[in-house]
Image: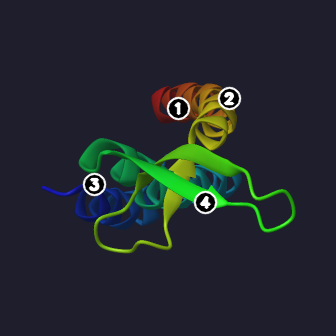
Amino acid sequence: MLFDKRAELLRELFDNCERVSEATKERYLSQLKLATNLAKSVRNVIAHNHILLELYKNPNDEELYEKDYIFSSRNKNKKISFEDMVVKSVETEAFAMELSETYLQILKEWRH
């Protein structure tokens, strides 16, 4: 099952959960939406495409420049540079920690 479909199923199941507070549900569902967006915008581009070299000439100094990107094969306007990957990696790690904390809160509430 694709990640989008699994996330949708989780949302439906979680909406009907009565053992978890509304605040925790809202936080989890918000994080699930963010995870889905990260998967679409970053993870899928990195996982399903390859690195391409972009060459361009600066009109001001006539120098030839190159930059490595991962381009989406479906949408050439979607590209991720190494610098973008580093930033997204840090953001994703922080997000994963928040999601883990929410998951622990869900378990605590579920047990009581």
Observer-side mark, 4 or 3, equals 4
Tell me whether the residue at label 4 lies in contact with that at label 3, contact meaning CB atoms closer than 8 angstroms: no
What label does residue 48 carry, if any? Answer: none
The three-letter amino acid code for the residue at tag 1 is: Tyr
Tell me whether the residue at label 4 lies in contact with that at label 2, contact meaning CB atoms closer than 8 angstroms: no
Q: CA distance from mark 4 to mark 2?
A: 29 Å
Task: State the count of labels.
Answer: 4
Disc with the residue nearer the chain's start (2 vs 3) = 3
- Outermost residue toward the left? 1
Q: Label 1: which residue? A: 103
Q: CA distance from mark 1 to mark 3?
A: 18 Å
Residue 56 in the image: state x and y as whole percent.
60, 60
- State the SS at label 4: strand
Q: Label 4: which residue? A: 56
Taking the image as shown, residue 98 lies to the left or right of residue 77, namely right
- State the SS at label 3: helix
Residue 47 in the image: state x and y as whole percent.
30, 43
Q: Is residue 97 above or below residue 66?
A: above
Disc with the residue nearer the chain's start (4 vs 2) = 4
